[in-house]
């Protein structure tokens, strides 16, 4: 991942202003430690902090068209850049960068080219011929982007809030799938897939179509000129990413440079469910596996730094970001700059345990749509900023545009959790890769129960966070929370503790408004809390809060003695709950 900063319409364009832009861009250097670039044109500035993944030697930014009248600063990867170059034969390319196509596409197609891009990206483009500019963000919001306004009439864009929060009177998260045009004077949506309307689809489920689409999504993300690996928790999603990547790595260009043995990475408290499951998957696939450990205290010590980097006070996001942040530092120390991860599957297929209580296929599908639309505020934010904090890029094949279109066109009746016929959560994905002739994964891994990352690294992690917050937040402080924090008022001591740290770094109203609020259970939206009356009394984002569904639900924790998550294929299921007598993963 790179870091971008762009400012247009500054009243002051002195040397002091240039120095200030450089200073603010430097706040993003963790995202791009490999090189810095700045283009100034009158009262317009485009800055870039580069993490070199494709064409490290010559792809420095900002990038230009042939006569440098079009300037672009980009954060992201354009996976179909070679195909796009074939449509731009009249242009001269100066670099091998995948992002250089953007300037030339703009020349040939105007502002309507964004949907031609297959990848993850946030970019800002300046046309110096008329001083117009555009900014755009990828379909789902895998890459972060913020937009702000200065008192002098200036317009700002930045990869992270910290680069513009001090100098903008107001700022916001740039909406995914949108483009801002100075010519048209506002935002408009460029990404308009069929599922966005939330109409109920009716396409029959075809497991081979799902499998082929996902394999294609993984393979295209093997595009790299630097060492890479896969984040492997041992759960279904990351295990499938690793299985597909390891199958196709030998035939990829990356194998010519970095070898055909896939590297995998996992982190957890010693004895955690994820570590054991990940090791088993790695052994099965024959990957070179790297296992990292952290203690609860090490995680707590990192909290302030984590919140500064991920720029949120959302409880679930902080719980999961901390181990990912620590793991990314270890990964970078090994010389790895890119990782492939499994975010997005639970939103697309209804994998969170609360989906067990979906009353019908209509509400099931509408909830998956709501979850995908909000990914940029949660899992995409976590995956991107936790890794980018250490100059590592995370790629997410489940959020491939083509794969999402296929997966979200399936009649949601197939995604419903059916206790009567043994379908657990994400059955359509599990079944698509359930190949007895040429198995991708062991059966009990393929059918392992959903485990949220913050749970899977070790249950005592969340318990330790709560205990720590209880030491720092008194009952009186929490009782007055509505007066101190009237917007998105924290309702637990843990949430209050995170909020105090966030406000220290980002004290403006605009900053706190970038974070969503509302009740949630096991990562549900507020609407889905209505599916079970008991949930309103147990509002906690952990998967264990899905009472009666998770094998280690809070109400059974004492009896289970903090047992590991129980795994088992569909035939081991009883009454919607995986049997406790199944084999421990």
Image (cartoon, rainbow, N blue to C red):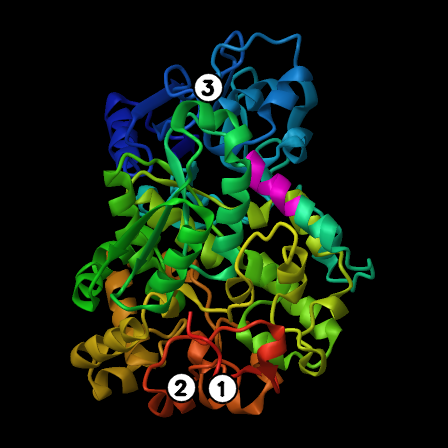
Q: Residue 167 carries which label?
A: none
Which residue is tagged 1? 547
* Disc 1 + disc 2, Cβ < 8 Å: yes
Q: Which of 390 and 194 is in front in this view?
A: 390
Residue 191 in picture, x, y percent from top left: 67, 44
Mark 2 surroundings: few (<14), some (14-19) or many (≥20) residues within 10 A: some
Q: Which residue is drawn at 32% across and 41% down?
A: 163
Q: Give the range drawn in magenta.
A: 213-220
Asked if the stretch drawn in magenta spans residue 402, the answer is no
Q: What element carries label 3?
A: strand
Of callouts 3 and 1, the N-terminal one: 3
Which residue is tagged 2? 554
Q: What element carries label 1?
A: loop
Work out how far the residue at label 1 is from the one at label 2, CA to CA, in angstroms.
Answer: 7 Å
Camera sees residue 95: yes
Of callouts 3 and 2, the N-terminal one: 3
Which residue is tagged 3? 63
Of callouts 1 and 2, the N-terminal one: 1
């Amino acid at each position: 991942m790179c870091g971008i900063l762009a400012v247009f319409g500054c009243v002051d364009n002195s040397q002091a202003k240039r120095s200030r832009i450089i200073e603010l861009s430097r706040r993003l250097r963790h995202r791009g430690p490999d090189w810095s670039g700045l283009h100034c044109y009158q009262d317009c500035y485009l800055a870039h902090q580069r993490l070199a993944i494709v064409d490290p030697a010559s792809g420095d930014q900002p990038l230009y068209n042939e006569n440098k009248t079009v300037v672009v600063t980009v954060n992201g990867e354009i996976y179909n850049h070679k195909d796009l170059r074939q449509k731009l034969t009249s242009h001269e390319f100066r670099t091998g960068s995948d992002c250089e196509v953007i300037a030339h596409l703009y020349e040939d197609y105007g502002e309507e080219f964004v949907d031609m891009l297959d990848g993850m990206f946030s970019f800002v483009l300046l046309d110096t011929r008329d001083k117009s500019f555009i900014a755009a963000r990828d379909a789902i919001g895998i890459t972060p982007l913020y937009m702000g306004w200065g008192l002098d009439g200036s317009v700002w864009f930045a990869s992270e809030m910290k680069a513009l929060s001090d100098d903008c009177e107001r700022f916001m998260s740039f909406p995914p799938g949108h483009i801002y045009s100075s010519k048209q004077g506002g935002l408009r949506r460029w990404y308009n897939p069929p599922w966005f309307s939330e109409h109920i689809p009716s396409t029959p489920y075809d497991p081979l179509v799902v499998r082929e689409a996902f394999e294609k999504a993984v393979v295209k993300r093997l595009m790299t000129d630097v060492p890479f690996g896969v984040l492997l928790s041992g759960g279904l999603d990351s295990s499938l990413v690793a299985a597909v990547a390891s199958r196709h790595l030998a035939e990829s260009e990356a194998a010519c440079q970095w070898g055909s043995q896939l590297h995998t990475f996992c982190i957890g408290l010693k004895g955690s469910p994820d570590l054991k499951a990940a090791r088993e998957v790695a052994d099965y696939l024959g990957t070179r596996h790297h296992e990292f450990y952290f203690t609860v205290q090490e995680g707590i010590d990192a909290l302030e730094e984590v919140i500064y980097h991920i720029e949120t006070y959302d409880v679930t996001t902080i719980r999961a970001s901390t181990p990912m942040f620590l793991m990314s530092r270890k990964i970078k120390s090994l010389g790895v700059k890119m990782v492939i991860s499994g975010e997005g599957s639970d939103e697309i297929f209804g994998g969170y345990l609360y989906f067990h209580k979906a009353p019908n296929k209509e509400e099931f599908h509408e909830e998956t749509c709501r979850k995908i639309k909000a990914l940029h505020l949660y899992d995409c934010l976590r995956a991107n900023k936790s890794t980018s904090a250490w100059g590592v890029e995370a790629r997410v094949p489940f959020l491939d545009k083509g794969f999402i279109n296929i997966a979200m066109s399936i009649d949601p009746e197939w995604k419903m959790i059916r206790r009567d016929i043994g379908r657990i959560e994400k059955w359509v994905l599990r079944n698509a890769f359930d190949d007895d002739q040429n198995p991708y994964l062991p059966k009990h891994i393929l059918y392992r129960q959903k485990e949220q990352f913050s749970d899977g690294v070790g249950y005592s992690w969340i318990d330790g966070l709560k205990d720590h917050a209880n030491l720092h937040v008194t009952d009186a402080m929490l009782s007055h929370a509505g007066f101190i924090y009237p917007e998105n008022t924290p309702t637990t001591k843990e949430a209050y503790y995170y909020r105090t740290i966030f406000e220290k770094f980002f004290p403006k109203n605009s900053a706190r408004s970038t974070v969503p609020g509302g009740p949630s259970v096991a990562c549900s939206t507020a609407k889905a809390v209505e599916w079970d009356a008991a949930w309103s009394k147990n509002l906690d984002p952990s998967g264990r809060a899905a009472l009666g569904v998770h094998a280690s639900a809070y109400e059974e924790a004492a009896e289970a003695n903090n047992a590991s998550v129980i795994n088992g294929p569909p035939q081991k299921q009883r009454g919607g709950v995986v049997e406790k007598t199944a084999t421990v993963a």
